[in-house]
Amino acid sequence: MKPLILSAVLLSAGAFAVSAQAQQWSTYPESYLGGDAMWWELDPDGGASSSDDFGLRLRGGAQFNELFAVEGHLGTGGSDGDVSLEYLVGAYAKGIVPIAPELRVYGLVGVTEVDFDVESESDFSYGLGGEFDMTPNLSLGADYMRYLDKSDYTFDAASVGLRLRF
């Protein structure tokens, strides 16, 4: 009888340990939504002065496993003299490299449409960033994006913000 009770206790303890470890792992797909402060710069080629200002960006997406997600950006705000950023909207594939359980770096590639008060342009976009989990569902992140790379100017943005997973 004692071996049977001991086996049941050990089996229960093992099941509890596996269950506790499984609760630490994320279940995929996982949705997220974030808000960022965004510092942008429109830099014309050929010696003209650049424009830069502050805006806001909303980003959301779905992470399908620990290495891949899709993400969308919607940003607006800021005016520097003759140039105002009306909006930017884009869709990106996100490759993720876990550094530690709570720390990740990532790369983004996709397409963005940017509308300034003077014109609207679309282009291939790319960027790099990183995130640190402050709680199981809340992370702090920063990234740098090249939204437009045209022959006569570039449009870049650096962003810092929070992301909520649900």
Image: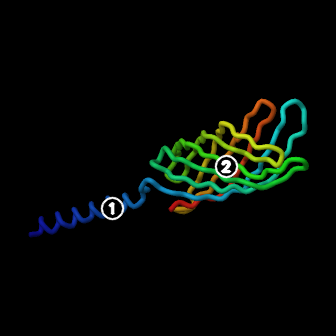
Q: Quadrant of the N terminus?
A: bottom left
Query: In this rendering, is residue 143 above or below 25?
Result: above
Q: Position of residue 46 (x, y in %)?
A: 87, 30
Q: What is the three-letter code of the residue carrying label 2?
A: Val
> Residue 22 appears at what percent x and percent y?
37, 58
Residue that label 1 marks: 19
What amino acid is labelled 1 in the image?
Answer: Ser
Residue at 68% x, 37% y is: 123
Front-lying residue, 37 or 71: 71
Reading the chain from its start, which is encountered first: label 1 or label 2? 1
Q: Which residue is mark 2?
A: 89
Instruction: Give the crowd class for mark 2: few <14, some 14-19, many >=20 residues within 10 Å.
Output: some
Gap between marks 1 and 2 measured at Cα: 41 Å
At label 1, counting other C-alpha atoms closer than 10 Å, the crowd grade (few under 14, some 14-19, many 20 or more) is few
Q: Nearer the viewer, mark 1 or mark 2?
A: 2
Nearest to the observer: residue 47 or residue 14: 47
Above-or-below relation of 16 to 50: below
Total number of numbered discs in the rendering: 2
Quarter where residue 59 is shown: bottom right
Position of 42 with respect to 58 (left or right) is: right
